[in-house]
Image (spheres, grey):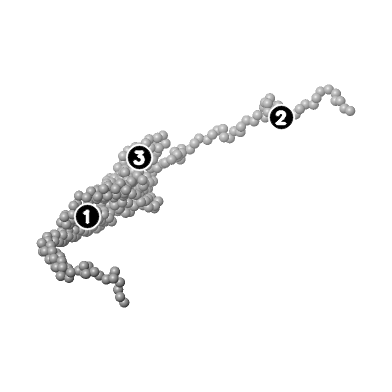
């Protein structure tokens, strides 16, 4: 089949084979020369990047292991002290565990961010990349993210400072303003509370403006005893002293009482009663149990000593009988007994009319 003349290649279009080979040789020579001139620089940059990555990985691993050992040591010391008399209060193992794990997580994250971020910047600098536009873009993006997630950032920062300052922990009873109850879980963003009725409260750390920790330091147990004004105050003080001494020697009250039971004095004096105030310093969270036990023992001791406890409306004196009312056996006078009274006149019969009667 004959080809058209238009499709046949011209002589001028046929490449010159020797020229093409020469150009290829020149290209290979230039590439080899470029590689020969820059291989040392590339090798230096590669080794520098590899050294940066290895050093960053080693430092990160060493820091994380050191933080993990520190947290493990803290947990071990908490478990060792927990079996002592005050271990349940001062060194709560679960509280220390959660606090140490939260602090360890924050420190590990911060350490990893700083080490890896610094390594990344050093790698980019080794590649001779201008970091100014990158840092500017990162700053703008950080500002935008900060405005968009300001509540999340506030919660996180509040949680970090709250955990580091040990404001409260697992097992503490707190009043957070928006909710109150026993702390069952502490997080970097949310604190979980169990209320008095068993409900679970999830409180964001950024919403907590004030915290009242009812489980730190010590608590006060106060009991008010109302007795008759005629009772001997010295005798009442002696009976309460005996009750306090006996209670302080028994378990578990010997650990829950952190101070002597004291009679503070008369809190109120009325015509029918007087109030004696009894107080004691107790272990945090145990004041209500101490108050109930004190009331129980004081009531039994006062009954045995013949000291009467009163409350509410004043009770009548059982020893004194009220005099009989002489008018109780006398009947009330009747108005009908007087014939001149209006009642007697109203009941009298109507007399017949005077004069002759007219009949048909």
Q: Which residue is mark 1?
A: 113
Q: Residues within 10 Å of mark 3 (few under 14, many from 20)?
A: many
Alpha carbon distance from label 1 to label 3: 63 Å
The quarter of the rendered structure image containing the C terminus is top right
Residue 178 in sight here: yes
Numbered disc 2: secondary structure: helix
Q: Which residue is mark 3?
A: 276
Q: Is the residue 66 above or below the residue 208 in the image?
A: below
Q: Nearer the viewer, residue 45 or 198?
A: 45
Viewer-side label of 1, 3 = 1
Q: Which residue is mark 2?
A: 347
Q: Is the residue 346 above or below the residue 159 in the image?
A: above
Q: Residues within 10 Å of mark 2 (few under 14, many from 20)?
A: few
Which residue is at a point 36% across and 47% down the rendered structure image?
Answer: 179
Quick one: label 1 or label 3, which is nearer the N terminus?
1
In the rendered image, the residue lying farthest to the front is: 5
């Amino acid at each position: 089949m004959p080809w058209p003349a238009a499709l046949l290649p011209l002589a001028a279009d046929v490449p010159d084979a020797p020229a093409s080979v020469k150009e290829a040789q020149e290209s290979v020579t230039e590439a080899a020369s470029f590689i020969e001139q820059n291989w040392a620089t590339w090798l230096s940059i590669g080794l520098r990047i590899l050294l940066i990555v290895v050093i960053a990985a080693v430092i990160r691993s060493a820091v994380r292991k050191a933080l993990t050992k520190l947290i493990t040591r803290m947990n071990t010391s908490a478990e060792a002290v927990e079996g002592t008399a005050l271990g349940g209060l001062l060194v709560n193992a679960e509280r220390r565990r959660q606090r140490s794990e939260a602090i360890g997580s924050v420190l590990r994250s911060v350490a990893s961010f700083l080490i890896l971020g610094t390594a990344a910047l050093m790698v980019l600098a080794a590649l001779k990349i201008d970091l100014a536009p990158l840092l500017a873009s990162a700053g703008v993006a950080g500002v935008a993210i900060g405005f968009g997630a300001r509540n999340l950032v506030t919660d996180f920062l509040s949680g970090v400072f709250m955990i580091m300052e040990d404001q409260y922990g697992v097992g503490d009873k707190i009043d957070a303003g928006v909710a109150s109850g026993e702390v069952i879980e502490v997080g970097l963003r949310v604190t979980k509370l169990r209320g008095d009725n068993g409900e679970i409260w999830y409180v964001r750390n950024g919403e907590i403006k004030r915290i009242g920790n009812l489980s730190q330091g010590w608590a006060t147990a106060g009991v008010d005893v109302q007795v008759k004004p005629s009772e001997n105050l010295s005798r009442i003080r002696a009976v309460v002293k005996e009750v306090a001494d006996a209670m302080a020697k028994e378990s578990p009250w010997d650990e829950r009482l952190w101070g002597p039971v004291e009679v503070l004095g008369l809190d109120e004096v009325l015509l029918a009663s007087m109030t004696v105030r009894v107080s004691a310093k107790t272990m945090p969270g145990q004041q209500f149990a101490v108050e109930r036990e004190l009331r129980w023992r004081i009531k039994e001791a006062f009954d045995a000593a013949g000291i009467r406890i009163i409350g509410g409306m004043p009770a009548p004196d059982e020893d004194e009988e009220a005099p009989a009312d002489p008018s109780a056996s006398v009947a009330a006078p009747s108005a009908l007994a007087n014939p001149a009274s209006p009642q007697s006149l109203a009941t009298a019969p109507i007399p017949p009319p005077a004069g002759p009667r007219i009949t048909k």
